[in-house]
Image (tube, rainbow, N blue to C red):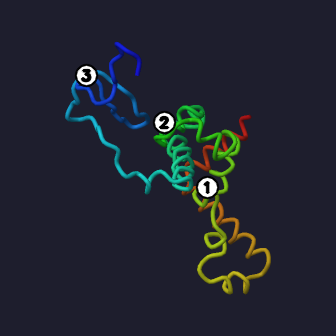
Amino acid sequence: MQPGSTPLLGTPQHRWTRDRHHCRLVQGQPQTSEVTTPTDTRATRGKEATKARLIGAVGALLARDGFGALGGNAVAEEAGVDKVLIYRYFGGMADLLEAFGQSGDFWPSIAEVIGDDPSELMDMPLAQRWAMGLSRYAQALRSRPITKEILAWEQIE
């Protein structure tokens, strides 16, 4: 430390605080609502947990605000993470959207299309089998408002 300089840590005038996204050095006495000590966030911080939060944030934004509101800043804010993690974990928004599209929340599962008893479907004549499968597929799509919005948006583009 240089002569005449004041140490920043350990003085009553300066302290570290944490908010939702950042740690920072501030002046003044701690307020009761501020967190001044690190907490154990390992359960919510790991790479896979963060990726899941980012994918979930895409779905939440699409459902709440529509496709037009989707952007890197909005997704990062919704997920409660720094925007750079979108690029670190997914390479960019395009790959994050692809990961969302591949998640089980987007497309109907095979079980939804085939039904509980696949042998029942297989016993039907081919035309009836196709009609039943497509009907179930359409019904599953109707229960996914985010998927419907994205499919409609693709038609407009």
Residue linked to disc 3: 13
- Viewer-proximal residue, 136 or 52? 52
Badge 3 crowding class, 10 Å Cα cut-off, few under 14, some 14 to 19, many 20 or more, is few
- Viewer-proximal residue, 5 or 17? 5
Identified at 36% across, 36% down, the residue is 18
Quarter of the picture containing the N terminus is top left
Q: Contact (CB < 8 A) between labels 1 and 3?
A: no
| Residue 92 horizontal/vertical position (percent) | 68, 39
Give the residue furthest to the front: 3
| Residue 130 horizontal/vertical position (percent) | 75, 71
What whole-number distance in Å separates the C-alpha atoms at marks 2 and 1? Answer: 22 Å
Rendered view: 16 above or below 138: above
Of labels 2 and 3, earlier in sequence is 3
Of labels 2 and 1, earlier in sequence is 2
Rendered view: 145 above or below 128: above
| Residue 15 horizontal/vertical position (percent) | 30, 29
Residue linked to disc 2: 77
What whole-number distance in Å separates the C-alpha atoms at marks 1 and 3? Answer: 51 Å
Residue type at tag 1? Phe
- Residue 39 located left or right of residue 155: left
- Residue 31 located left or right of residue 20: left
Q: Image quadrant of residue 106? A: bottom right
- Residue 106, disc: 1
Badge 2 crowding class, 10 Å Cα cut-off, few under 14, some 14 to 19, many 20 or more, is some
Residue type at tag 3? Gln
